[in-house]
Every structure is written in structure tokens, then in C-alpha cells.
């Protein structure tokens, strides 16, 4: 992905990696989100969309490590490789709220 930024982070008890990518359009971002879900189905234990308030996240079980991904317009972002699902979702929510 072009225009993608990554960082390692520690947030409360969670350690992992975060990414943020700007795509050419909202449609391309949605396509990439769906491809991410397909990838989780092929190489992990699958993915599900989870609604938290007015935000929707893709939660992927990557064989015991969790990725939480969001799309906002042409942005695609998320956190990866968190061992606890609940912690991963909460960390993903906080990261999403921090992205403007």
C-alpha cells in the first residue's frame, strides 16, 4: 500500500503495531478492508465486523493474535497483533478516535 505509515505502540497493557494508509478514494479503502477480511479468513481464523457506538471495526483473529481495522473515507487504519481480543478492540477504538 502506498502512503502507509506504521508504528509500534504500547497503550495501557497492549503492545502491537499500528498502521494508517491513505487510499485514492473511499471505494478503494473499502475494497482493501474487504481484502483484509478475506486474508484473515485464509491465513487466520476469520474476521467479523463489530459495531462500537457509531464506529464499525473489522476484528480479525490471526491465530490467537487480533487485528482491528477501520475505514474512514479514504483512510484505512488499525492495530495488529494484540493477544487479547477485548484489549485489541478497545485499543482499536482509541486509535480510531485519535485519527482525525
Image (cartoon, helix red, strand yellow):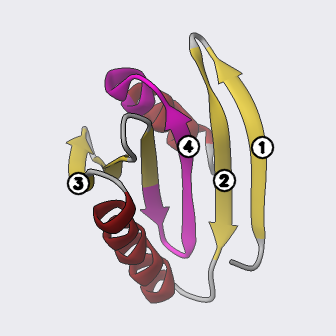
Please count the marks in the image.
Answer: 4
In the rendered image, residue 44, in percent from the top left (x then y), is placed at 35, 54
Disc 4 vs disc 1: Cβ atoms closer than 8 Å?
Answer: no
Task: Give yes or no for contact between labels 2 and 1 (Cβ–Cβ under 8 Å).
Answer: yes
First of labels 2, 4 by sequence position: 2
Q: Residue at x 66, y 53 (%)?
A: 19
Q: Which residue is mark 3?
A: 49
First to last magenta residue range: 70-89
Q: Are marks 2 and 3 in contact (CB under 8 Å)?
A: no
Q: Which residue is mark 1?
A: 7
Pointer 4 or 3: first along the chain = 3
Write down the quadrant of residue 67 in the picture. top left
Q: Which mark is residue 79?
A: 4
- Kind of element beneath mark 1: strand
Q: Residues within 10 Å of mark 3 (few under 14, many from 20)?
A: some
**Circle 4: is it few (<14), some (14-19), or many (20+) Cα within 10 Å?**
many
Q: Looking at the image, is 24 positioned above or below residue 97?
A: below
C-alpha gap between disc 2 and disc 4 = 6 Å
Say which residue appears at 36% left-offset and 60% top-offset: 40
Q: Are marks 1 and 3 in contact (CB under 8 Å)?
A: no
Amino acid at each position: 500500500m502506498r502512503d502507509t505509515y506504521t508504528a509500534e505502540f504500547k497503550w495501557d497493557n497492549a503492545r502491537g503495531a499500528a498502521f494508517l494508509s491513505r487510499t485514492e478514494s473511499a471505494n478503494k479503502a473499502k475494497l482493501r478492508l474487504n481484502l483484509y477480511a478475506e486474508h484473515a479468513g485464509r491465513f487466520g481464523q476469520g474476521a467479523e465486523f463489530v459495531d462500537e457506538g457509531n464506529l464499525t471495526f473489522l476484528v480479525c483473529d490471526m491465530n490467537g493474535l487480533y487485528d482491528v481495522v477501520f475505514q474512514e473515507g479514504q483512510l484505512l487504519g488499525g492495530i495488529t497483533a494484540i493477544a487479547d481480543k477485548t484489549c485489541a478492540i478497545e485499543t482499536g477504538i482509541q486509535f480510531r478516535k485519535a485519527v482525525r
